[in-house]
Image (cartoon, rainbow, N blue to C red):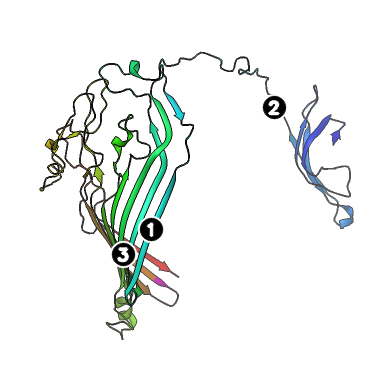
Amino acid sequence: YTDNTSGFKTVINFGRSLNPGNTKSFENNLFVLGYFPNGSSPPNVSLGVTYPASSGVKQARVYGYLKVTPIILPFVTASLTWTNPFPGTGNLPTNPALLAVARNRVNPYMQQWNYTMEYEVAKNTAIRVTYLGNKGTKLERNSNPNEPIMASGAVQPRRPYQPWGPIIYWESGRNSILHQAQFGVLRRYASGFALQAEYQFSRALNEFTFGDAPANNQNFRYDRGNQDGIRRHWFVTNYSYDLPFGRGRRFFPGASGIANKFAGGWQLTGILSVGSGQPYSVNFTATQLGWLSSRANIVNGYGPATPANQSIDRRFAPEAFAIPSPFTYGTGARNALFGPGLAEFNAAIFKNTNITERIRASFRAEFFNLANRANFGNPATNISVPANVGRVSSTVTDPRTIQFGLRFDF
């Protein structure tokens, strides 16, 4: 509405308008946005309720007044215009790096296939044999086509694409392959006991891990080798066993009262994981301009590289490797050696007790890495640092951890 006394005009009104001049109806006004002509003073905004006379309630009118002060925004001249879209000054590097995407890049895809045979060897117990294949095709590769062939001297003048520096080029050129044999045993839960066990033998090859740059941008197959993080041998088993104590069980079947509450409700669970080591490469650090760091040379094959008496101070024999001639790549394969194996046993004890018909208590004691075995990581692999090369200084699992818990349900 327009208030002729103040010159206030509503342009946006959310809700219903308030009409204080009509005492036989009332309407709620939620929000009013307005403007005032030049020279007018800020208006009063009111919100109230009027009861109609037909309701039998004595008429009453309640209004609250709020003084509104206008906010004046100064006019600012835009600094960006079509005639000068980049105001100011800046410095561009002499040889800027580029990020490019191949015109024929496509989305990567994975193919999987498997063949499984299962046989029930006893009641509630079955064995399984599976062959599993997994192939990655058209996987992402980030290479540098502007990397020159290694030679002595400054690098930039020898780049094939001038005046650019490194060019990060995304294309669809990598692939991966995995073959895996699985042997499993499964016992369904029966008579308070359940068991599952599986052994896996894996062979996995790829070019390099996604996100890593190739060591040799002129020969991508130089980086093809064992896939990172894949343990060739892996065995895991888990079990759950309800101890046969308490009323109706094998031992103390006639227990009652407090004796039954203490003897019954015990359960043992555990997970055992055993695996061979993860693969790693032996490398070196280049010391001359124009020479790229890469993998070391293998001297007399990989047999002498892994001594029989391996230890955390001598996981492999550094003398089996050598720094290659300047401006050449090493002959060692990617991920040709394997680190220490892993063995870990986690166990738990549970006790469930019905205190009353409505209250139930659950106690648990959990043991992680129960044997407190040190599962070591891969050794230092840079033969340019002879003080550390071949030595193991890290672990891949935590030391033994024990935790207790108590829960009441009611």
Residue type (three-letter) at the residue carrying disc 1 = Asn
- Numbered-mark total: 3
Q: Tell me the chief SS of the magenta region.
A: loop
Instruction: Give 144 or 84, whichever is nearer the viewer.
Output: 144
Residue 354's spot in the image, x, y percent?
Answer: 39, 75
The Cα–Cα distance between marks 3 and 1, rounded to whole angstroms, is: 15 Å
3D distance between C-alphas at marks 2 and 3 = 75 Å
Q: Between label 2 and label 3, give the one nearer the viewer.
A: 3
* Residue closest to the eye, 403 or 331: 331
Regarding mark 1 in the picture, which secondary structure is present there? strand
Residue drawn where x is 47% and y is 36% of the image: 105
Residue tagged by mark 2?
Answer: 71
Residue behind mark 1: 114
> Residue 76 is drawn in which quadrant?
top right
- Residue at 84%, 51% (x, y): give it: 51
Q: In which quarter of the image is the N terminus?
A: top right
- Name which of mark 3 and mark 1 comes first in the sequence: 1
- The span shown in magenta is 356-360
Q: Quadrant of the C terminus?
A: bottom left
Vertically, is 157 above or below 359?
above
| 275 is higher (above) or lower (below) than 161 | below
Query: In this rendering, is residue 90 above or below 380?
Result: above
Measured as percent of width and height from the top left, residue 376 is found at 21, 47
Please name the amino acid that badge 2 sits on: Ile
Front in this rendered view, residue 300 or 156: 300
Q: Position of residue 91 (x, y in %)?
A: 46, 14
Pointer 3 local density, CA inside 10 Å: few below 14, some 14–19, many at least 20: some
Give the amino acid type for the residue marked by disc 3 in the picture. Gly
